[in-house]
Amino acid sequence: MKRRRLVFLSAFLAFWFVAAVPALAAEGSESNPAEQGIGVIFKWINFAIVAGAIGYLCVKKGPGFFRGRAERISAAITQAAAAKAGADRQLQDAETRLRSMEQEIAGLRVAAEREAAAEGGRIRAATQMEVEKIARAAKAEIEAAERGARFELKVLAARLAVDGAASLLTKQLTPQVQEALVNAFVQDLAGRPN
């Protein structure tokens, strides 16, 4: 569209330039027949034809051109107004979400603090239970170790007693004492009723 206007304007200026050249050339001469009587009438007729052609073109093409231009401008204004309204709605939505987001963040912080406190309580309780469990296991292990040590001590004491008795018997049991013991055992057996 701009190109058409530029071509039209260039053609219009070229036409006026071509029309003005003879007039400028004639200024230098002294007597110009175009400026006398009938020449002036032809000038006005020529001017009327050119002005009529330009007027006709303006009347014929002007309203359509200006109407189209006005419609494009109106459509652009309507589009811009719709875009502005949409942007305003988006801005209001964003501001509303931002306000609600601040409240939501505060709520999340409170919930997180509550959950952290509850989790801390659960961890303390679980730790206390584990400590008690370990203490019971350690006590049971100590008791089992104590029983084992007492049993080993009894076994050791019995072994030492047997070894001590065996060494004492070996020292005190001479062949004569052995013979006397055997004889006493045999007599004891013989004296018992079967």
Image: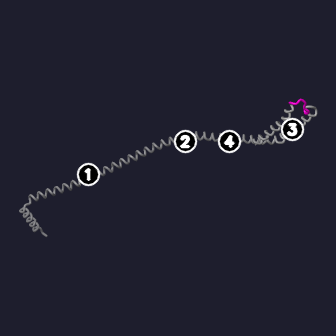
In this view, the residue in front, 104 or 63, is 63
Main SS of the magenta segment? loop
Q: Which amino acid does label 2 sit on?
A: Glu
Magenta region includes residue 32:
yes
Q: Mark 3 or mark 1, which is nearer the start of the sequence?
A: 3
Question: Type of residue at label 1?
Answer: Glu
Quadrant of the image occupied by residue 16? top right
Name the amino acid, label 4: Ala
Residue 4 in the image, given as x and y percentages of width and height: 77, 42
Q: If the image is split into quadrants, where does the C terminus sit?
A: bottom left
8 shown above or below 137 = above
Q: Earlier in the sequence, mark 2 or mark 3?
A: 3
Q: Earlier in the sequence, mark 1 or mark 4?
A: 4
Quickly name the residue at label 2: 104
Where residue 103 sits, quadrant-wise, is top right
- Residue that appears at 15% across and 57% down: 163
Residue at the spot of label 3: 50
**Distance (Cα) linking label 1 and label 3:** 133 Å
Is label 1 or label 4 in front?
Answer: 4
The reply, left or right, for residue 88 in relation to residue 16 is left
Give the residue at mark 1. Answer: 146
Identify the element where label 2 is drawn.
helix
Q: What stretch is highlighted in magenta?
A: 28-34
